[in-house]
């Protein structure tokens, strides 16, 4: 099955590498990457794809007719999106007879959109990974398969993100044979039960108001959810300056 792969980050790289190395019935026909400023592991993705430059595309140009024509000429059967951060439009989605499939690090319909690792901690929503079809909404398409991930009391935004990475890759590897065989389930999402967040939504929790009342749970959950060095997270203001906050959590297994 000919695949147009749209990917970013470690999970994108590892998924593409697995498709190339596993004999899983995938022929990589083309690659779509983020522009340089947003790209993560772009060099590794290029190496894993082993494609000529003519088959590699800038994700910010997918709305251009000339680019769409070039992608159509690849005659890919399916598009696979892994942590790809652009909204895909109908003109693009219509190019693939087997549809466009997305790997999202959340247990849909919870945590559509951005930072699912943060919101599972802050809002107490279920965490996990979902492989689903892309429709015209954001993470609203029919579900193929899911895997739930436990959120532990000592998890931070970083440790939960790493769990979700591993779960996402494993889910894709387990489910891909059914996609190739044309046996992948099509399970409609329960839209009313879900949640959605934009990138800027974390701004409303990042500043800790020193004059506001929080429960201990609320404050700890915000601080640990936004602990992901080297990225900036929660902070408070004092003396005209921002004071950045990170939380270190560990289990006391000493028996004391």
Image (cartoon, rainbow, N blue to C red):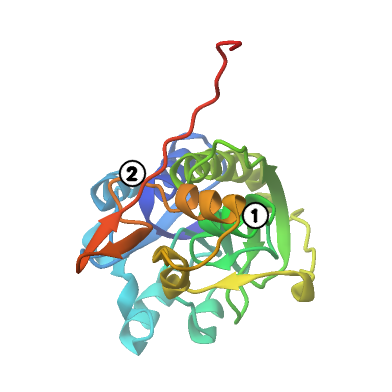
Residue at numbered disc 2: 48
Residue at 37 percent across and 56 percent down: it is 8
Which of the 4 quarters of the picture holds residue 102?
bottom right
Compute the Cα span from label 2 to label 1.
23 Å
Residue at 68 percent across and 57 percent down: it is 125
Residue placed most toward the observer, 221 or 1: 221
Which part of the image, by quadrant, shows the N terminus? bottom right
In the image, residue 155 above or below residue 58: above
Ranked by sequence position, the earlier of labels 2 and 1 is: 2
Residue at numbered disc 1: 130
SS class, disc 1: strand
Q: Is residue 173 left or right of residue 34?
A: right
In the image, residue 136 above or below residue 3: below
Question: Which residue ends up furthest to the top in the rendered image?
Answer: 255
The numbered disc on residue 207 is none
Q: Is residue 192 left or right of residue 71?
A: right
In the image, residue 87 above or below residue 180: below
In the image, residue 25 above or below residue 196: above
Percent x, y of residue 165? 50, 43
Neighbor class of circle 2 (other Cα within 10 Å; few <14, some 14-19, many 20+) is some
Please say if the residues under marks 2 and 1 sit with CB atoms less than 8 Å apart. no
Q: Is residue 137 left or right of residue 160?
A: right
Percent x, y of residue 237? 29, 65
Which part of the image, by quadrant, shows the C terminus? top right
Neighbor class of circle 1 (other Cα within 10 Å; few <14, some 14-19, many 20+) is many
Say if residue 173 shows up in the picture: yes
SS class, disc 2: helix
Percent x, y of residue 219? 52, 54
């Amino acid at each position: 099955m000919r695949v147009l792969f749209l990917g970013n980050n470690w999970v994108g790289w590892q998924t593409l590498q697995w498709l190339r190395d596993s004999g899983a019935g995938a022929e990589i026909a083309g690659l779509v990457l983020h522009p340089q400023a947003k790209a993560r592991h772009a060099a590794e993705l290029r190496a894993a794809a082993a494609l000529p430059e003519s088959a590699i595309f800038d994700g910010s140009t997918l709305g251009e007719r000339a680019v769409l024509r070039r992608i159509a000429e690849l005659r890919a059967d399916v598009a696979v999106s892994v942590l790809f951060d652009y909204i895909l439009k109908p003109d693009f989605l219509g190019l693939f007879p087997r549809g466009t499939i997305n790997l999202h690090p959340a247990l849909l319909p919870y945590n559509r959109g951005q930072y699912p690792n943060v919101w599972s901690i802050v809002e107490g929503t279920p965490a996990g990974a979902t492989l689903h079809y892309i429709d015209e909404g954001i993470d609203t398409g029919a579900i193929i398969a899911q895997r739930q991930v436990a959120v532990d009391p000592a998890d931070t935004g970083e440790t939960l993100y790493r769990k979700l990475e591993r779960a996402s890759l494993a889910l894709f590897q387990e489910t891909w044979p059914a996609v190739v065989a044309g046996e992948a389930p099509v399970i409609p999402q329960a839209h009313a039960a879900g949640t959605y967040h934009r990138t800027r939504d974390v701004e409303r929790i990042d500043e800790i108001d020193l004059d506001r009342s929080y429960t201990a749970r609320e404050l700890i959950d915000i601080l640990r959810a936004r602990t992901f060095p080297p990225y900036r997270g929660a902070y408070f203001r004092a003396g005209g300056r921002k004071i950045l906050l990170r939380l270190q959590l560990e289990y006391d297994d000493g028996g004391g």
